[in-house]
Image: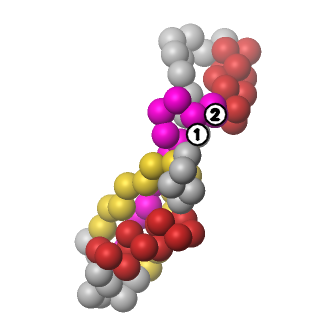
Amino acid sequence: MKIRVYVSLKPGVLDPQGRAVHHALDGLGFEGVEDVRIGRFIELDMADGTTDEALESMCEKLLANTVIEDYRIEKVER
């Protein structure tokens, strides 16, 4: 089973990388970009039958810093 985990900063948390990209897009002349938030994408190949609880535990313990980040788990059919 393929698992995709999307990790992003919680609303209100300062995102200096997103601000830098926003500034760079402005500098390149791209108009209409109102905000940029940078996150990360993690793809896992897991054994069939891996429980939701195990996936949540991975996210809580390692893949996301839940103090400042949110995460979303997506299961992808092969």
Residue displayed at 53% across by 17% down? 33
50 to 52, vertically: above or below:
below
- x and y percentages locating residue 44 in the rendered image: 46, 74
| Colouring scheme applied when the structure was drawn | secondary structure
The crowd level at tag 1 (other Cα within 10 Å; few <14, some 14-19, many 20+) is few
1 to 59, vertically: above or below:
below
- x and y percentages locating residue 13 in the rendered image: 57, 34
Left or right: 45 in relation to 69:
left
Quote the CA–CA distance across marks 2 and 1: 7 Å
Mark seen at residue 38: 1
Residue type at numbered disc 1: Ile
Secondary structure state at the residue bearing disc 2: loop
- x and y percentages locating residue 23 in the rendered image: 70, 20
Residue displayed at 38% across by 69% down? 56
* Nearer to the camera, 32 or 37: 37
Residue type at numbered disc 2: Asp
* Nearer to the camera, 37 or 55: 55
Mark seen at residue 15: 2
Residue 63, quarter of picture:
bottom right
Left or right: 64 in relation to 78:
right
Residue 27, quarter of picture:
top right
> Looking at the image, which residue sits at the far front?
67
Residue segment shown in magenta: 1-15
- Let me know if residue 77 appears in the view: yes
Q: Are marks 2 and 1 in contact (CB under 8 Å)?
A: yes
Residue displayed at 67% across by 15% down? 26
- Let me know if residue 18 appears in the view: no
2 to 11, vertically: above or below:
below
* Nearer to the camera, 37 or 70: 70
- Does the stretch in magenta take in 19? no
- x and y percentages locating residue 61 in the rendered image: 53, 70
